[in-house]
Image (cartoon, grey):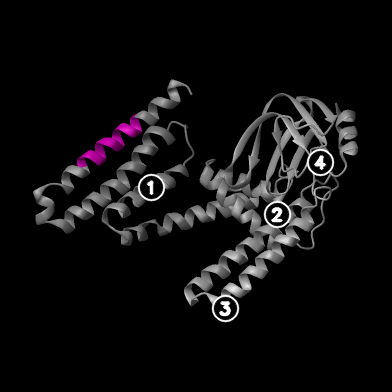
Amino acid sequence: MSAAIVRPRLQFAAVLAFVLAAESAVLASRAFALHPLPLRLAVIFDLCTVAPLAWWLLVVRRGLARPRTVARVALLAIALCAAIFGREVRLLAVPLELALIWLAVASVRRALQARTSPDAATALRLGFSDALGDHPAARAVAAEFSVFWYALFSWGRTAPSGFTAYKRAGWIAIYVALGIAVLAEGIPLHFVLPRGWAIASAVMHLYTALWLIGDLRAMVLRPITVEGGVLHLRLGLKWEADIAIAEIDSAALGSRVEGQKLAVLGSPNLILRLRRPIQLHGLFGIRRTAQTLSLQVDDPQGLHDALSASL
């Protein structure tokens, strides 16, 4: 990262450290014990205004961050005030949280409508990253929304033509067995546990069932496709990556595990060797970097021929 980018952030950190030190001195002073309410309001005002204003002047105004990041800094400042003075201060964050939700919804809608978004899960990830920032928390939220979208709202949609990766491994039978186990465990527990624990158990078992349904629907609706000079690697909600065909060095049939093993039960049947490492997006914001991928697809010969023809 260049000095032109790092220096403004260091300046912001210095300003924030100075403000925190000054407010800590106020909170520890005798005057605060004599006049707690006005000084309390003054500290809250300083923390909730100086931090976002400093971020705007030092970082956003120089084009080093988007204007919407000011809302995130304000939320962090309010969270700090809530940690110091109590949860009631968190009510200050409600307008900002609503604004962030609106930005997330708008970004997701734009991503779903964009031609560059091949599926809902990718659109949700890109939309939330655009609205909330590209960090693990935003990617985890996108993964949760993806699970519920595929479990509840994907019915009636048809999968694009491509190469599936769930039949040979028996994912349908495995998920059906897990679903039966969830029901067999959850129903008796609902009648045995006390009321509060029974409700918590029902929520957890329902979430597990939705997760199984959502991931299975994603495996059906998100096949691996080769189009526009790009290999769109999709393995349910577990892994995804967009790999330029020009970056693929070779595609070989074989059962030997090499590099990163992706969502394989048993032995892989297709090995992709890349010219350079690529980034893989996994569940809940997990990322991996790999240069060799071991896959198990339902039609390895067909995908191998498609890649060979493109290469």
Q: Position of residue 226 (x, y in %)?
A: 82, 37
Amino acid type assigned to the residue bearing label 3 in the image: Phe
Q: Is disc 4 surrounded by few (<14), some (14 to 19) or many (20+) residues within 10 Å?
A: many
Which element is circle 4 on?
strand
Q: Residue at x 43, y 47 (%)?
A: 71
Among numbered discs 2 and 3, the one appearing first in the sequence: 3
Residue drawn where x is 20% and y is 44% of the image? 24
Q: CA distance from mark 4 to mark 2?
A: 18 Å
Q: Write down the region rendered in magenta.
A: 11-22
Tell me the number on the disc at residue 215.
2
Instruction: Find residue 42 and name its label.
Output: none
Q: Which callout, 2 or 3, points to the residue nearer the camera?
A: 3
Residue at the spot of label 1: 76
* Depth order, front residue of 296/307: 296
Q: Are marks 2 and 3 in contact (CB under 8 Å)?
A: no
Query: Which amino acid type is shown beneath numbered disc 4?
Result: Thr
**Which mark is in front, 1 or 4?**
4
Front-most of residues 136 and 270: 270
Marks 2/3: CA–CA distance: 29 Å
Dot 3 or dot 4, earlier in sequence: 3
Looking at marks 4 and 2 on the same chain, the residue that comes earlier in the sequence is marked by 2
Give neighbour class at mark 2: few <14, some 14-19, many 20+ (Cα, 10 Å).
many
Proximity of marks 3 and 4: CB atoms separated by less than 8 Å: no
Residue depicted at 29% across the width and 58% down the height = 86
Horizontally, residue 293 falls left or right of residue 131, namely: right
Ranked by sequence position, the earlier of labels 1 and 4 is 1
**Residue type at mark 1?**
Leu
